Amino acid sequence: MVEMKVKIPTSLLISSFLIFLMVGSTLTYFLLQAFRPVGMVVLPEKNIIDYELSVEQENLAIQKGKTLVKFYYSQDCEECELIKNYLEDFASKHKDQIILQKITTNSSYEIKFSSFFGKRSLKNCTEQEIFKAFCDLMFNPPVECVRLE
């Protein structure tokens, strides 16, 4: 009897192995995503809150095109009250785009903005500087921003 040896080229073995790895990793990723818990992260119902969002909530909000504003202020700061009123008014007018987080501290005020377009921090600022930050960072800025440029 004559035995025939089948010789498989090395390149075929390597390419088959790489294809197997690629298909396997794709299927694994799909299965992991399909069975991941959904709906665990929820944004607050109101857009003006007195606490900080979690990192997961912040990421979700930015993914949804929202601009996050963290207003750190002291209770006994008179200027802070004016700034807080301005921020609340602006956030109320743009409920679908802004989440305002008011956080009391013992130091002077600071405003931290973050959105898909970047981050900005302001201290001892004017309403016009705050408005410009909104114009620069909002996903869909108000029409008044055009006049600012």
Image (cartoon, rainbow, N blue to C red):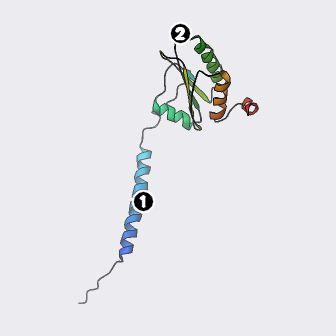
Name the element at disc 1.
helix
**How many numbered discs, if any?**
2
> In front here: 103 or 140?
103
Report which residue position mark 2 lands on: 76
Label number found at residue 51: none
Q: Where is residue 103 in the image (x, y as percent from the top left)?
A: 50, 19
Q: Position of residue 81 (x, y in %)?
A: 60, 13
Image quarter of residue 142: top right
Q: Which of marks 2 and 1 is nearer the N terminus?
A: 1
Measured in 3D between alpha carbons, the distance from the residue under mark 2 to the one under mark 1, in whole angstroms, is 61 Å
Q: Can residue 61 be seen in this view?
A: yes
Q: Position of residue 17 (x, y in %)?
A: 37, 66
- Apparent side of residue 142 relative to residue 9 in the rendered image (left or right): right
> In front here: 94 or 30?
94
Amino acid on which disc 2 is placed: Asp
Q: Are marks 2 and 1 in contact (CB under 8 Å)?
A: no
Name the element at disc 2.
loop
Q: In which quarter of the image is the N terminus?
A: bottom left
Amino acid on which disc 1 is placed: Val
Image quarter of residue 148: top right
- Apparent side of residue 85 relative to residue 20 in the rendered image (left or right): right
